[in-house]
Amino acid sequence: MARNWHATQKGSWNEVYAGKVLASLENDVFPTLGSTAIADIRAPAGDAALNFAMSAWHLHDWLWADLSEDSNGVDDLSAALDGGIKTKADFIRAIYRRCPAVRVCRVIATAGKHVKVDTFPEPSLRTRMEHKHDHRRRWQIDLKGVSTPASTVFKEAFRFWEDLLSQLAIIEDPGFQRERRGW
């Protein structure tokens, strides 16, 4: 399939670029995927975790954009987060106070996109892969000397957003969903 795609695209590319794309496929993609069917290709867990962190962080942007257009939206948001929210910066500070896990997601999302965090860095935050005796790996997040599995941090961020969106009547009561997930 990839070779067919390349054949259909190379007419619109110069010869050098077409060669680089094919070489990249042969060196980087084919050895990894081999003859794996397209339906069986799955993103590595690290990609899913990064995607979650980006979504958990950027949810504040999407929510602010929607609520700031509603005449009562910011007031409702402020009430749900114990008051004092007038600006997006106030909203971010309220998120940080309520849910440090979302702050961790911000750092992961920013570093995942920009390689490092220059604006509002978190020097006490480190991520690492812990290798277990059963040959499994677990992503750990170390914040201010406390080590926590990344899955725990992500669940905390998820619960924060689930609760807030429920308070704002954007989603239904999250309790039922948690029972189904066993959280």
Image (cartoon, rainbow, N blue to C red):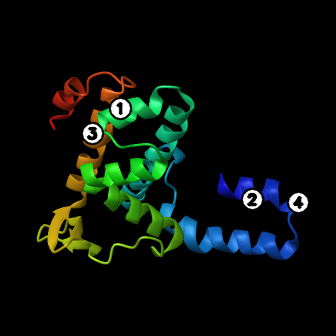
**What is the three-letter code of the residue carrying label 3?**
Asp
- Category of crowding for the residue at label 1, using alpha-carbon neighbours closer than 10 angstroms: few (below 14), some (14–19), many (at least 20): some
Residues at marks 4 and 1, CA–CA distance in whole angstroms? 49 Å
Q: Residue, x 33% and y 49% (percent of image)? A: 95
Give the residue number, with chain letter if any, for mark 3. Answer: 82
Residues at marks 1 and 3, CA–CA distance in whole angstroms? 15 Å
Label 1: state its secondary structure: helix
Label 4: state its secondary structure: helix
Mark on residue 6?
Answer: 2
Image position of 156 (left or right of 70): left
Residue 77: where, in percent of width, then height? 38, 34
Q: Residue, x 48% and y 48% (percent of image)? A: 88
Which quarter of the image is occupied by the C terminus?
Answer: top left
Residue 28: where, in percent of width, then height? 56, 71
N-terminal of the pair, mark 3 or mark 2, is 2
Label 3: state its secondary structure: loop
Q: Quadrant of residue 82?
A: top left
Give the residue number, with chain letter if any, for mark 4. Answer: 11
Give the residue number, with chain letter if any, for mark 1. Answer: 165
**What is the three-letter code of the residue carrying label 1?**
Leu
Residues at marks 4 and 3, CA–CA distance in whole angstroms? 59 Å
Image position of 20 (left or right of 65): right
N-terminal of the pair, mark 4 or mark 3, is 4
Q: Nearer the viewer, residue 47 or 96?
A: 96
Q: Nearer the viewer, mark 4 or mark 3?
A: 3
Q: Residue, x 22% and y 67% (percent of image)? A: 140
- Category of crowding for the residue at label 3, using alpha-carbon neighbours closer than 10 angstroms: few (below 14), some (14–19), many (at least 20): few
Q: Nearer the viewer, residue 28 or 103?
A: 103
- Vertical comparison of 144 with 175: above or below: below
